[in-house]
Image: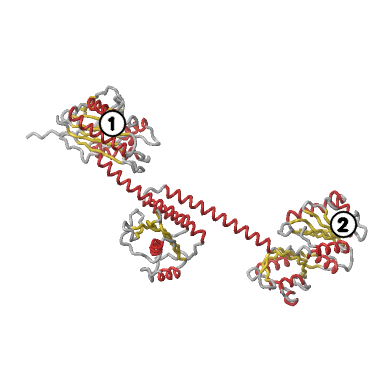
Amino acid sequence: MSGLGPSDSALLDTILKEAPIGFALFDAACRFQRVNPTLAAVYGVAEEECLGLRPADALGPADAAAHETALAAVLTGDRDLCSEHRFPAAGDGDGHWALSWFPVHDGAGDTDGVALIAVDLGEKNVRRRTEERYRALLAATNQVVWTARTDGEVTEDCPEWRAVTGQSLEEYVGRGWLEAVHPDDRPRVERAWDDAVADRTLFDETFRVRTRSGDHRHFRSRALLINGETVSEWVGHNTDVTTQHEGDEMRQRLTQQLGEAALRTVRLQKATADLAEALTVAEVVQAMAEIGRSAVGADRTGVAELDDGGTRLRVIGASGVPERGRPAGAGKDALMGLTVRDLRPRFAGGPAELRALLEEEEHEAAGAEPAPGERAWAALPLLSGGKPIGALGFSYAAAREVPDEEKVFLEALAGQCALALERAKLFEREHRTAEALQASLLPEALPEVQGVRMRAFYRSGTQHVQVGGDWYDAFPLPDGRVAGVLGDVMGKGIKAATGMSRVRNALRALAFSMPEPADVLTGLDRMFDATEGADQVTTLVYFVLDPETGQIDLSNAGHLPPLVVTESTEPWLLETEPDTPLGVRAERGHHKFFVQPGNTVVLYSDGLVENRRRSVASGLEELVTVASQAPPEVVGDPQHMLQYLVEGMLAGYEQDDDVTLLAVHLPVIEAAPEE
């Protein structure tokens, strides 16, 4: 309401003083800002008595209630309102007035107030002049007023509309005004106008209009069927809402762009998390296939790496091994080759674009048909330290263009894929090295001793690349007996492995000079004090077995109790009081028992019975239970017994530590038949 110029203000002042209709202007707080003499006379008060007051403070109760209700409806709904009201205080006429309420908008298109037009329904033969005044008033607020017959046909000229569209009077009347509506909007607008005319309901549509200059502007058109004493017709007004519409579109675009940017950020974070969990090359390829489907919308995803010479690009299969001898296709394989050569992303939105690109680059796949089901492609280099290590490729089943924002996302994704691929290859190299080191620290074979069958089992923790501290060993002694040991050095890595190697070598040396278990452990304590750190915890079980008698002499340095499995009775644990771990000075104990023919003694590490979901105590109970359920053919075979125990104890649990077992079995010696 504050946007009128000097000429507009003068025009409005003239209309306010001379119009035979009532006029009032209210602000957004429903306070009178203007009242012309005609309406003030209807109210029965002076003009200045209304200014700055709400209707409830200036008018009678009935008149105030009608005004307050109409003002609230127009301000909250941003819509026109027509009503009739009788003013008991009216001096002239029969006091029956038609009230038309209109929202007044500021330059930004927001509702800034309400205009009230009051027409005396008792006044005769003044409709035309009233209508002209009404149009003049609305012109000041950028409104184009028009009328039509009850059947929807326009018969009266609207110069303001024709000034906008450039139509002649003949082109405008009837339904010619629809010719100025944008072709894409016209069917909707014409259908809405027909429905409003047929149902005699409010017509309210927003559409684009071709202007005199040939461009298009957005208009909102509203019309209501007026039934008077002498005439019935449609009265409507058109408002140019281009600025408001452009502002809404800009807000929608910004909101959409912000939403898409946030979604891309979430997708990249999710992809980064998934790739961080991939330890092996095969897992990286699998993760990228899922990311390509869910985050990129690709139908196929390929990861390729350069060979050691850096000259040939090889696609990595699902097993994590590069596919050798695979022919290069004309789709993503070809683009991956180009992107590694040029070190920049490559995109092809359709087959024609792909063919042109390959011909331009004189690629060997030029002229070849792409793989079935591929209609668009994207390829990005995988870089490490600025040097290419491979390529990432996507193919789509439908032709599509990749927008700039999506290209930025794909480049960031390729960076995460390169990091994951390098990390996985390093992991696999370290894992192979750890396995080789672990194997070198364990005996190549167990000794073959008459009357004894010995078997061992070792499996490293799957999630570790470092060498573990578990070990076992067995060797014959000069006196015909056989010695065996199973131990565990706390920790992982080179420190644990070297400590385990020193203990293993020292134990062998001590066993050949003084083989009795208590003596060997006492000697190991002295060596441990001299060579190992205070934080190096090592436990072990060491035994000496006489194959002829079945006697076992055993010492336990803080390790888990051995398991004894028999053919005729329930299995049990050798619950001897264990001594302290190595290096903790204490008098070493010595335990003697006999192994009957057909029985098996099993030594094992804590990885068999303990994990994150199972304590050592419950694990030991479960070990005895599993062993008691072993069938006879398993009890008589130490190799099968070890496999049976491992499968039974690890079923349903995730292995997170090394698992090591050593079994000593005394077979039943059948008597030779008499001759």
Q: CA distance from mark 1 to mark 2?
A: 112 Å
**Depth order, front residue of 435/625:** 435
Residue 203, position as x, y percentages in the image: 72, 64
The disc at residue 86 is: 2
Q: Is residue 118 left or right of residue 310?
A: right
Residue 6, position as x, y percentages in the image: 81, 63
- When the figure is inspected, residue 282 is found, relative to residue 349, above or below; the finding is above
Label 2 Cα neighbours within 10 Å, binned few <14 / some 14-19 / many ≥20 = some
- When the figure is inspected, residue 602 is found, relative to residue 65, above or below; the finding is above
Of badges 1 and 2, the one in the foreground is 1
Sequence-earlier tag: 1 or 2: 2
Check the picture and name the quadrant holding the C terminus: top left
Q: Are marks 1 and 2 in contact (CB under 8 Å)?
A: no
Residue 648, position as x, y percentages in the image: 32, 38
Residue 497, position as x, y percentages in the image: 29, 38
Give, as a three-letter code, the residue at label 2: Arg
The local secondary structure at tag 2 comes to: strand
Which residue sits furthest bottom?
170
Label 1 Cα neighbours within 10 Å, binned few <14 / some 14-19 / many ≥20 = few
The disc at residue 576 is: none
**Depth order, front residue of 529/315:** 529
Provide the residue designation for mark 1. 531
Q: Is residue 273 left or right of residue 5?
A: left
Q: How is the image coloured?
A: secondary structure
Which residue occupies 45% across, 64% down? 347
